Image (cartoon, helix red, strand yellow):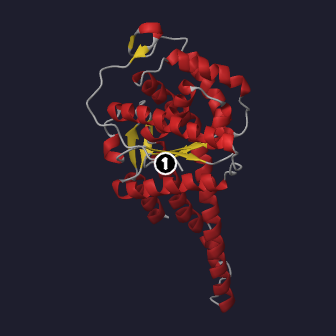
């Protein structure tokens, strides 16, 4: 047991702590696992895409609307990505550019990975968002990347998985010797018990990591909203205009599935936020918030949707 406790202590020491852009303490993977973190979050994102229902084939008119929507995503994404790299200089050290992809998925939703990929589901087009509301959707998903939320999720999964693999076999070790005699039957039972314990540990680690990550999700969404509402004014959008458009959209959004439910809640919180002081920046004509001084940095590349 002391060795187990020592192993757990060393594991927790290897896991680092960092401060998010909004000042929240969060877990981060050690340097050796940061590459794995990017790969894992990419796999997790693709798993979500595989399990989401595909959009039906489009008619000629719908295909034209889809292409126009794709171009809007690229244009808005480029505008926001340029500001993101200016506001968060560390992004250059984490990935070279944001990539924006429109996935042909029927439901409204979005996903992203630690490597800077942002995926917008085709179903969002059916919500008929104007540019300010659509920019908020993009900015909020980008902010999950900026805030290091994917790294935090991966680190949580690693912690839970390692803890399950260490603790569960130890807690069940008495069953390996319950027979007392070192017979062939006992050895077979021990091997079977070991396999069972390993399977239970894997199932427990998967369920445990999902549950723990779900408990982080509300904090991460609120933090992403706060980061997004700093990106938008710097990119030239009026925060109150964004809030009004989200508020007009909110009654039409279903409470399910999870993504549209989160968007409803975001719209409510942004409306509450806009009742306070105007976001940073100087107010220009028509109440538009003029972004602060720009830095001479080349805009990041943006991939074509597919």
Kindly give the residue lying farthest to the bottom in the view shown.
184
Q: Nearer the viewer, residue 204 or 120?
A: 120
Across and down, in percent, residue 87 comes to 35, 30
Across and down, in percent, residue 172 comes to 62, 68
Across and down, in percent, residue 101 comes to 52, 46
Residue 222 at least partly seen: no
Is the residue 259 above or below the residue 239 in the image?
below
Residue named by callout 1: 113
Q: Nearer the viewer, residue 291 or 192?
A: 291
Residue 265 at least partly seen: yes
Local secondary structure at mark 1: loop
Q: Nearer the viewer, residue 251 or 148?
A: 251
Q: Quadrant of residue 65?
A: top right
Residue under the image location 64 percent in, 20 percent down? 247
Say whether residue 173 is left or right of residue 254: left
Residue under the image location 67 percent in, 77 percent down? 178
Residue under the image location 52 percent in, 64 percent down? 166
Across and down, in percent, residue 154 comes to 49, 52
């Amino acid at each position: 047991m002391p060795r187990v406790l020592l192993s757990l202590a060393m594991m927790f020491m290897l896991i680092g702590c960092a401060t998010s852009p909004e000042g929240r303490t969060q877990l981060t993977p050690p340097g050796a696992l940061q590459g794995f973190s990017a790969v894992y979050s990419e796999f997790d994102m693709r798993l979500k895409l595989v399990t989401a229902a595909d959009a039906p084939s489009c008619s000629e008119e719908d295909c034209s609307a889809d292409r126009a929507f794709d171009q809007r995503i690229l244009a808005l994404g480029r505008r926001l990505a340029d500001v993101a790299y200016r506001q968060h200089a560390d992004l250059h050290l984490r990935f070279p550019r944001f990539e924006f992809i429109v996935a042909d998925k029927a439901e409204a939703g979005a996903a992203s990975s630690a490597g800077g990929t942002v995926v917008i589901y085709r179903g969002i087009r059916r919500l008929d968002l104007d540019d300010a509301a659509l920019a908020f959707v993009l900015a909020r998903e980008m902010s999950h990347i900026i805030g290091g939320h994917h790294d935090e999720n991966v680190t949580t999964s690693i912690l839970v998985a390692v803890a399950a693999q260490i603790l569960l076999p130890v807690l069940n070790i008495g069953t390996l010797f319950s027979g007392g005699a070192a017979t062939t039957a006992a050895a077979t039972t021990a091997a079977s018990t070991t396999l069972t314990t390993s399977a239970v540990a894997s199932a427990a680690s998967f369920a445990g990591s999902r549950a723990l990550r779900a408990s982080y999700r509300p904090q991460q969404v609120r933090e992403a909203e706060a980061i997004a509402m700093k990106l938008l004014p710097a990119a030239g959008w009026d925060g109150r205009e964004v809030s009004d458009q989200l508020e007009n959209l909110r009654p039409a959004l279903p409470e399910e599935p999870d993504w549209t439910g989160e968007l409803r809640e975001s719209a409510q919180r942004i409306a509450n936020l806009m009742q306070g002081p105007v976001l940073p920046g100087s107010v220009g004509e028509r109440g538009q918030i003029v972004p602060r001084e720009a830095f001479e940095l080349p805009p990041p590349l943006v991939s074509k949707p597919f």
